[in-house]
Image (cartoon, rainbow, N blue to C red):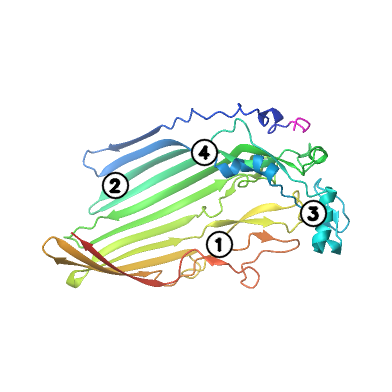
Amino acid sequence: MNALPRTEYFDPANYITDGTDRPTRKDMFQPRIGFSYDFNDDQRTVLFGGYGKYYDRNVFNNTLDEQFRLQYQTGNFNFSRDGLPRDGTPTVKWDPKYLTRDGLLALRDSAQTGQPDLFAVKNNAKAPSTDQFSLGLRQKFGIFRASVTGSYVRGQNGYTHLFATRNVDGSCCDTTVPRANGFGNVLIGYDGLRTRYKALLVTIDKDYTPSSGWGVNIAYTLSKAEQDGGDLFSLDKATPDQYGWRPIAGQDERHRIVLSGIADLPLGFQFSTLTTLGSGTAFQLQDQSAGTSVNQQVIRSLYRPKNCLGSLFGFCEVNLTLQNNVKIFNTHNINLAVDLLNAFNNKNYDGYAGYLGVGQTYSFDRTTNAPTNLLTLPRRIQFRVGYRF
């Protein structure tokens, strides 16, 4: 490792240890503070807000490979028509004999390629943390309460892996040193992933009371969730910040509406609903349409297509409940309920292809990119009986 070039993100001294350079952190102070201010002392107009600092930890799997890959070696063989290197990595000129076990064993013994990668954990890696802020105003209008809340969450020091063998110009990769020492490449742990979440939440509430016989809550969220870098591996750029900000897969959704309500019906029945409508979350696409090289591929963010209520939403789920409470023995109750879940049998698809091959274009046409699974189950009926005393 000392023979590798030092860069702004890599110093070999930060990855070499005799076991005493990785102490347990004792500085994760996590303050939280909140406030509310009632302007007229009548609970009608209230300003509220808060701040909190939260720490996480690097899970074991993030740091496992440093030792595990030395005990259980995994080699990747890259075949090509000409046998010339790609991104500094040797390739093997293809021969049909590699379709046989004996041919592969002979290739492995040659050790020209397929050598295991060296993983190294950063000694003084910072613990992942987030700073979370919120500020809002709540106002009462007759029987209704409305609130508007702004939220901002900033995450830093997420753990990922980078190449320690990039060339001076940032291209990938010069593997001369690791291959001379029996390794394919060197991947280093780096505590530089960042995330940010911005949201505006608007709610309207009317509490249920026996006298009114109904209640409702409507919540609308306008949000944006972003990250830089990749996930556990950020190998498409030299460092995560060079990726630029992009939507977080499975989390970034611009619009979401949640409606919950309850209403009394004759003969002691109650009807309620929980309805969720969303514009659709993002997913990541590994775009190799320009080539399969690390220096050619790019990571793109796409959003699931809108196929609910025409083309208004990308996620729809309507759950309906009809229930009745039967009083027995004065203080005892039997609750009978039937739930119609996903009442309109909306298809909330997931599992769109996350890969685009050389020369290909991306389309949501079902013949070329059919989703592979559903986020929600199909329509179903559930019966419930409860006894309370």
Question: Which mark, residue 78?
Answer: 3
Q: Helix, strand or loop at disc 4?
A: loop
Q: Helix, strand or loop at disc 2?
A: strand
> Residue lying furthest right in this view?
82
Q: Residue 35: percent from the left, percent from the top? A: 33, 35
Residue density around tag 3, few if under 14, some if 14–19, many if 20 or more, within 10 Å:
some
Identified by mark 3, the residue type is: Asn
In the depicted structure, whether residue 7 falls above or below residue 283: above
Question: 63 or 295, which lies in front?
Answer: 63
Q: Helix, strand or loop at disc 3?
A: loop
Q: Main secondary structure of the magenta part?
A: loop
Q: On the image, which quarter does residue 80 sit in?
A: bottom right
Residue identified by numbered label 2: 139
Looking at the image, do the residues carrying marks 2 and 1 touch, with CB atoms under 8 Å apart? no
Between the residue at mark 2 and the residue at mark 1, the CA separation in whole angstroms equals 36 Å
In the rendered image, the quadrant that contains the N terminus is: top right
Whether residue 234 is visible here, answered yes or no, is: yes
Q: Nearer the viewer, mark 1 or mark 4?
A: 4
Q: Helix, strand or loop at disc 1?
A: loop
Q: Which residue range is magenta in the image?
A: 1-6
Q: Earlier in the sequence, mark 1 or mark 4?
A: 4
Residue identified by numbered label 1: 304
Residue identified by numbered label 4: 57
Q: Is residue 147 magenta?
A: no
Identified by mark 4, the residue type is: Arg
Identified by mark 2, the residue type is: Gln
In the depicted structure, whether residue 278 falls above or below residue 174: below
